Image (tube, rainbow, N blue to C red):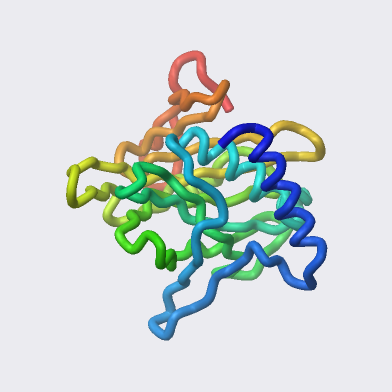
């Protein structure tokens, strides 16, 4: 996606949100079995997860309250891969919460089911959420699991390791993006359009050991 296209899409989404009483980019509902299903796509196609994460941060931190500090709101979305197109997509958003928000902790329940009729064989490759109050992962984020942590395409047998992205932007500053790999437990930062490994989660409590010379 070109920078011009990305800016135009972002402007359209922001104007759409401002013109409606409810956010049109939040398209999620609870199924009878209790699982959350989200529609797709909100954005894409992207050829790389780096491009998806960069655009996803711009889009998701532009939603109401997403950059509002301690009183802000969290949003969640799914990342998924379309084998027939060899491309990644970002789903629409969820604002469901699994517990009451407080000043100390914001929450967003990650959808488990994707609804994209144009891409019925899509693979969910991970999730995204915004942090309105700080850029780093919380211990709860880093102690989380996604089973299975790896998914495989049927035709090409390409293996994807599922990841969680966190997005943050304060004021007019640049977006910050971090990822944690559910299979390897490696934490990376998106810097200069590339993933840079910065640390490793070494226990089930979400404690991280930073690699030499690396930091948040």
Work out whether residue 49 or residue 201 is closer to the camera in this orientation and state it: 49
Vertical side of 46 occupied by 129: above or below:
below
How far from the left and from the top, in percent, is residue 146? 35, 54
> Which residue corresponds to the image point at 36% horizontal and 38% vertical from the top-left?
185
Work out whether residue 6 or residue 124 is closer to the camera in this orientation and state it: 6
Work out whether residue 147 or residue 117 is closer to the camera in this orientation and state it: 117
Q: In which quadrant of the rendered view does residue 207 lie?
A: top left
Q: With 185 as the anchor, is 57 left or right in this view?
A: right
Vertical side of 53 occupied by 18: above or below:
below
Report how many numbered discs are placed on residues in the image: 0
How far from the left and from the top, in percent, is residue 111? 47, 64
Q: Is residue 4 visible?
A: yes
> Which residue corresponds to the image point at 78% horizontal and 51% vertical from the top-left?
68
Q: With 51 as the anchor, is 66 left or right in this view?
A: right
How far from the left and from the top, in percent, is residue 155? 18, 48
Quarter of the image that includes the C terminus: top right
Q: With 122 as the anchor, is 137 left or right in this view?
A: right
> Which residue corresponds to the image point at 41% horizontal and 50% vertical from the top-left?
126
Q: In which quadrant of the rendered view does residue 13 lie?
A: bottom right
> Which residue corresponds to the image point at 37% horizontal and 54% vertical from the top-left?
124
How far from the left and from the top, in percent, is residue 12? 73, 52
Vertical side of 36 occupied by 140: above or below:
above
Q: Residue furthest top?
A: 213
Q: In which quadrant of the rendered view does residue 7 lie?
A: top right
Q: Can residue 210 be seen in this view?
A: no
Q: Residue furthest bottom?
A: 32
Vertical side of 129 occupied by 190: above or below:
above
Quarter of the image that includes the N terminus: top right
């Amino acid at each position: 996606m070109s920078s011009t296209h990305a800016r135009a899409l972002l402007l359209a989404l922001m104007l759409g949100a401002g013109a409606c009483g409810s956010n049109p980019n939040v398209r999620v509902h609870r199924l009878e079995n209790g699982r959350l299903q989200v529609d797709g796509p909100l954005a894409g196609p992207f050829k790389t997860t780096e491009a998806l994460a960069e655009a996803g941060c711009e889009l998701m931190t532009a939603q109401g309250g997403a950059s509002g500090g301690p009183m802000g709101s969290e949003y969640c979305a799914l990342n998924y891969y379309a084998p027939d197109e060899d491309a990644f997509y970002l789903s629409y958003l969820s604002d469901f919460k699994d517990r009451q928000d407080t000043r100390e902790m914001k929450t967003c329940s990650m959808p488990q089911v994707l609804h994209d009729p144009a891409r019925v064989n899509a693979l969910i490759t991970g999730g995204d959420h915004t942090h309105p109050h700080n850029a780093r992962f919380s211990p709860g984020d880093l102690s989380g699991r996604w089973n299975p942590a790896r998914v495989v395409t049927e035709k090409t047998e390409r293996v994807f390791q599922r990841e969680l992205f966190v997005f943050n932007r304060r004021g007019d500053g640049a977006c910050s993006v971090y990822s944690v790999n559910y299979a390897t437990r490696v934490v990376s930062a998106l810097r200069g359009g590339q993933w840079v490994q910065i640390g490793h989660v070494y226990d089930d409590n979400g404690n991280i050991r930073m690699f030499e010379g690396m930091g948040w």
